């Protein structure tokens, strides 16, 4: 654990140093190109660029989940999640380095299993390696966050992505990540190394629309071998603006994830067979920019899991509304 934290912190430090150098180069080029502006115009432009490099955000999310525990109890719950975040970009228009920190308080009715204070720190460094070849390095530390499996745990992730930009606004990328998952003491047998690799294709269409197809393969290696599994995830995303002024947008995502347990069995027709799960997730998100510093998000998610272990089957519907305020000027 200590070695992983050292690696992640070292990566963040190196990317900050590289990003600072890149930012200076960008600023120098911008200054050279602004020779035809008056001193007052250049001053205002510089101040505006610096002001938009960092900001704080405040959000309030309200959600209703028809089955928050994802089991046969079918516990419906209403939740409120206020959060506060700090954000930094080394360049307001085309950042090469980004850092985001968010702390959130989670409170739900009918259960205290998911009540917590969560923290998330993410750093991203982008670099152009060749004319159409780009690199993206991401480090993330999530404490008491919620994973894609709705588990409350700590995640430590180091991901490297390489992207190639083809003609006609097509982008292909491959990625690989080393991920550590750590659970509370009562669930420490679930502690695992869950590394993954994958690829994706993104097609950008006219009118700022885009379609993305992603495949990911991950192998969960837990302390308890019964929690070892192999999962394949297929994701299709679509996003489009809904108005000419680009003040609102609609996004949809479909995800299918079959999972095969390597050392866990269940009884089917009197015979012990390896456990197999199939999970389908479909969500729709509507985003509306109410003001320059205030946005609203309405979302719905449908989730279903089938399994040859009948006790692990469930269906869930989640409805949510989020308001986010970004504070730029100080």
Image (tube, grey):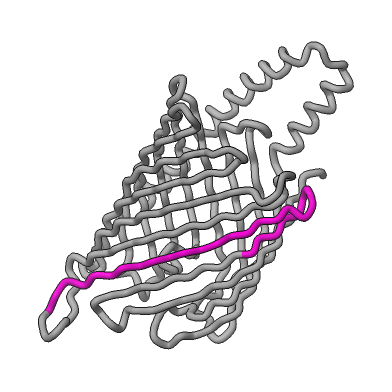
Residue 110 screen position, x and y as percent: 55, 86
Q: Nearer the viewer, residue 6 or 15?
A: 15
Q: Quadrant of the C terminus?
A: top right
Quarter of the figure with residue 201: top left
Residue 255: in sight, yes or no? Answer: yes
Residue 230 screen position, x and y as percent: 25, 59
Q: Nearer the viewer, residue 262 or 249?
A: 249
Q: Is residue 23 left or right of residue 137?
A: right
Q: Which residues are magenta?
A: 272-298
- Residue drawn where x is 36% and y is 46% of the image: 177
145 in relation to 314, above or below: above
- Residue drawn where x is 39% and y is 66% of the image: 280
- Residue drawn where x is 28% and y is 82% of the image: 310
Judge whether residue 156 is colored magenta: no
- Residue drawn where x is 48% and y is 57% of the image: 253
Quarter of the figure with residue 148: bottom left
Q: Nearer the viewer, residue 128 or 295?
A: 295
Residue 58: in sight, yes or no? Answer: no
Residue 64 screen position, x and y as percent: 59, 76
Label count reads 0
Q: Is residue 157 left or right of residue 241?
A: left
Q: Main secondary structure of the magenta part?
A: strand
Residue 325 screen position, x and y as percent: 74, 55
267 in relation to 17, above or below: below
Quarter of the figure with residue 290: bottom right
| Residue at the left extreme, as displayed | 271
Judge whether residue 290 is colored magenta: yes
């Amino acid at each position: 654990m200590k070695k992983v934290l050292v690696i992640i912190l070292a990566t963040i430090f190196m990317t900050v140093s590289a990003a600072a150098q890149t930012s200076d180069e960008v600023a120098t080029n911008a200054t050279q190109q602004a020779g035809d502006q008056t001193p007052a115009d250049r001053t205002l432009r510089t101040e505006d660029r610096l002001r938009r490099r960092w900001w704080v955000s405040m959000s309030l999310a309200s959600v209703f989940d028809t089955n928050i525990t994802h089991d046969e109890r079918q516990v419906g719950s209403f939740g409120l999640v206020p959060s506060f975040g700090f954000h930094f970009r080394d360049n307001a228009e085309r950042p090469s380095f980004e850092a985001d920190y968010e702390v959130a308080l989670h409170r739900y009715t009918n259960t205290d299993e998911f009540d917590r204070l969560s923290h998330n720190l993410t750093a991203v460094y982008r670099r152009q390696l060749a004319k159409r070849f780009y690199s993206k390095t991401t480090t993330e530390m999530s404490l008491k966050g919620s994973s894609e499996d709705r588990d409350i745990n700590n995640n430590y992730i180091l991901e490297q992505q390489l992207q190639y930009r083809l003609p006609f606004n097509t982008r292909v990328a491959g990625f690989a990540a080393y991920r550590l998952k750590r659970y509370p003491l009562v669930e420490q047998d679930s502690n695992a190394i869950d590394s993954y690799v994958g690829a994706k294709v993104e097609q950008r269409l006219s009118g700022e629309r885009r379609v993305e197809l992603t495949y990911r393969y991950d192998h969960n290696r837990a302390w308890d071998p019964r929690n070892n599994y192999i999962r394949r995830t297929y994701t299709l995303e679509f996003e489009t603006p809904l108005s000419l002024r680009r003040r609102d947008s609609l996004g949809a995502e479909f995800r299918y994830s079959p999972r095969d347990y390597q050392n866990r069995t269940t009884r089917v027709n009197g015979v012990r067979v390896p456990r197999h799960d199939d999970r389908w997730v479909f969500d729709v998100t509507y985003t509306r920019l109410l003001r320059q510093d205030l946005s609203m998000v309405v979302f719905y998610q449908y989730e279903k899991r089938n399994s040859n272990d009948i006790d692990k089957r469930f269906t869930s519907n989640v409805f949510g509304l989020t308001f986010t305020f970004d504070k730029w000027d100080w």
